[in-house]
Image (cartoon, grey):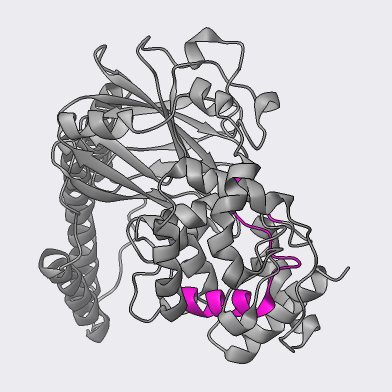
Amino acid sequence: MAIAIAIAVLTLASLAFHFLSPWFYTPIASNWGQLDDTVTITLWVTGVVFVVVNLFMAYSIWKYRTRAGLQAEYVPERNQLEAWLMGLTTVGIAALLAPGLIVYARVIDVPKEASLVEVVGRQWNWSFRFPGPDGKLGTTAARYVNDKNMLGLNPDDPHGQDDVLIMSQELHLPEGKPIKFLLRSLDVLHDFSVPQFRVKMDLVPGMITHSWLTPTRTGTFDLLCENLCGLAHFAMRGKIVVEEPAKFETWLAGHQTFSQAMAEPAGDAAAGKQLYASCASCHGAAGEGNSALNAPKLAGQADWYLERTLSTFAKGARGADERDTYGKMMAPMAMALPDATARKNVVAYIKTLPDSTAPATIEGDTRKGHQFYQANCAACHGGAGEGIKAMNAPRLAGQSDWYIERQLTNFHKGIRGTDPEDSFGPQMVAMAGPLSDERQVKNLVAYIKSLGSK
């Protein structure tokens, strides 16, 4: 009797939890309301079966409980009951499958007027590409991928020359216009998913998959990878910004085409030398850094990372937090460089400076640091701390250890990497999360410092 009551109570409690639960659909932001309808139908069909079966089971336990004078009867077959079960099961399965098949037929039937957007996934970040005025995307191949041509576009394909490259974690889309996503992976299996859009699709290495939707409301939405794609899978997050078409066109016009990126001139080191004069008073004439002035070593760091860091400071995405004392000192210095050309020139000069290993100032257990580094850092920054541009991970080996320690602490505390304009900072915030102990940080930094001395 107690078991029957327990089953009935659990069944009714599950039902009440479903209807009273605050966790349900995120507000939809696309044309795929039919997917919500399909899920709702599935919940009703499975819910009815769940309630009926469990209550029938509770009733049977109560009805046929052991009582004096009663004896069970064995009935191996009952055709009428089996016919009812087969009929009801058939109706239930049809109700589950039919809506999904109808919706899937629409998912793969892309409107002819849909605009193209290529989504490229790699461990562990997103990139995007729009066709230029010719309306066609250029061809790609893995053999073309390098530090300058990160998406692997065919340099000999004329259709690719005007393609617009979005080398950040943020994609903008126009409201009210159908979009066809061409999905491509450069390494492992990823998944393109925005919960508010409802549709999702895998990015399969060696294939081009696709999906489509029409954004129906403006806003900023999280872009997630929903396939376990490796160590930093949890940090592979981007942003989708849906805005009015006019704003979208303005945003798109602010990005380089493939031909512009390939033809971009190198920085002028001679012009950069003059600009560096204001930097030398803190960072040193040879870019060696000065811990007394809280200025890290610059010589030997990757040029692309120095440019991105200066840009991040210049647009206020770093150094704005009141707790970032030294970042606030650097921000106005970066803003003094008038434009991207000036930043490129000063970085070109820094690249000419002799690279020497910064002195060690942090002591720690390098054995423990090595264990943490190999498990959490090496996949992006390289086994020798050399940095990997494809991972957006700068060089660590040979750099100022006290500065690395401070930045890890800043990432852990959310002082750095939380500004909406900092596209890549949130990944490091997530990766620095496990470093909650000061000794653990010192062990890691001490090991990184040992890489620079080999």
Q: Nearer the viewer, residue 400 or 251?
A: 400
For the residue pair 46 and 239, the one nearer the viewer reads as: 239
Q: Quadrant of the N terminus?
A: bottom left
Residue at screen point 70% across, 62% down: 378
Query: In the shown orientation, is residue 322 left or right of residue 442?
Result: left
Q: Nearer the viewer, residue 421 or 198?
A: 421
Is any part of residue 391 visible from this angle? no
Q: Taking 435 as reference, is 188 above or below it?
A: above
Rendered location of residue 70, percent (x, y): 24, 77
Q: Where is residue 63 in the image (x, y as percent from the top left)?
A: 18, 73
Q: Is residue 255 left or right of residue 7?
A: right
Question: Which quarter of the image is occupied by the C terminus?
Answer: bottom right
x and y percent of residue 158 in the render?
52, 8
Residue for point 15% across, 66% down: 15
The magenta-colored residue range is: 387-411
Answer with the quarter of the image where residue 385 lies: bottom right
| Residue 157, picture quadrant | top right
Task: Confirm whether the magenta stretch covers residue 396.
Answer: yes
Residue at the spot x=48%, y=56% of the render?
310
